[in-house]
Image: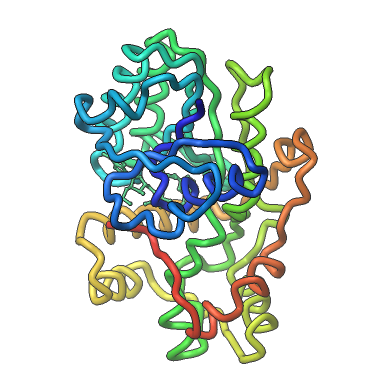
Amino acid sequence: MILITGANGRPGSATVREFARHGTPVRALVRDPDKAGDLRALPGVEIVHGDMLWPETLESALDGVDRVLMISGAGPELLETQCTFIDAAVKAGVGHLVKFSGKDSIEGFDNERFRSSRSHEQVLRYLLASGLPWTLLRPSQFMQVYFEEVPDIVAHGELRLPLGDTTLAPVDIEDIAKVAYAVLTTPGHEGVTYPMTGPEALTMADAARHLSDAIGRPVRYRDVTSEEKQRDWLAAGYPPPRAKAFAQLFQERKRLGRSTVDLSTHERFGIEPTTFAQFARRNADVFRGAADYTVTPA
Ligand SMILES: NC(=O)c1ccc[n+]([C@@H]2O[C@H](COP(=O)([O-])OP(=O)(O)OC[C@H]3O[C@@H](n4cnc5c(N)ncnc54)[C@H](OP(=O)(O)O)[C@@H]3O)[C@@H](O)[C@H]2O)c1
């Protein structure tokens, strides 16, 4: 049996859907079964309830599991959550753990300087020491992160980010889910790291142009200061530590400036990379403010 954690979240639910699309049975771990509504209706999906921070809640979820895709949120509990889960997986006799991590597309980005990327590195060291066979998925910024900008796009026709003419190479979560499915259902991935970016290094002016083309309304990139953006995030209800962490991350991206495209994983699995224009068209109703969307949790 294959288990996916974080199954109510964005990459987790996309991977569960990919399993259902192939008709491959999968077990989906959720913290809150009431939020698992549409996953429950998918064929071959077994929803199990558990909290990765509480090993005693994981025993039945891990029973008979050979492979796991381990995902949890990027918040301050990432390190404890994933190390606790690794201990439970070892105890349950899991044979292969695929860790969902991250990798900035920006050249020269130092993972150890930022809390969430540093936590991923610390979990990786713990995983290597655990002796569990592992695989690492390292996607860059998700294209779906641009859903956070919907209020400004709808209200002002502006994409407001503190990035100057920095380029980023965001990747579509649907592409990542296809890779995750292949890694979890075929042999030969143990000890391998799979980095992923999208197919283009885009300035935010490029991104705004694609959004504008998709929704049929003007969208202009406005290069705001880091302080302005942090104030906007706080006004939008982001917890202060998260607004500060985002501001630091964007300052570093702006300082370094250039992204590198890495399609080696798409090519390895024969997956056509989704362009930002295709992503924007597929989600045009979201960017028009006419459909629901999910943003990064606190
Ligand atoms: N955002 C990006 O651009 C990006 C890029 C590359 C990699 N990543 C990485 O992708 C991962 C997912 O991030 P995301 O922003 O997409 O988060 P997300 O959509 O919220 O997914 C995380 C899921 O983990 C679940 N979870 C958290 N703690 C848990 C626990 N103790 N027990 C069980 N489930 C738990 C959450 O459950 P609930 O639904 O109950 O809250 C949520 O469903 C993170 O590790 C992040 O570093 C993010």
Rendering coords of residue 172 (x, y %): 61, 55
Q: Residue at x 49, y 14 (%)?
A: 95
Tell me: 130 left or right of 175: left
> In the figure, 59 relative to 214: above or below?
above
Q: How is the image coloured?
A: rainbow
Instruction: Count numbered badges in the picture.
Output: 0
Tell me: 206 left or right of 112: right
Q: Residue at x 29, y 56 (%)?
A: 34
Q: Residue at x 54, y 79 (%)?
A: 287
Rendering coords of residue 38 (x, y %): 45, 59
Depth order, front residue of 127/225: 127
Tell me: 206 left or right of 42: right
> In the figure, 248 relative to 19: above or below?
below
Q: Quadrant of residue 278?
A: bottom right
Rendering coords of residue 46 (x, y %): 44, 40
Q: Residue at x 41, y 57 (%)?
A: 251
> In the figure, 210 relative to 39: above or below?
below
Tell me: 3 left or right of 49: right
Image quadrant holding the C terminus, namely bottom left
Rendering coords of residue 118 (x, y %): 36, 34
Depth order, front residue of 271/255: 271
Q: Quadrant of residue 218?
A: bottom right
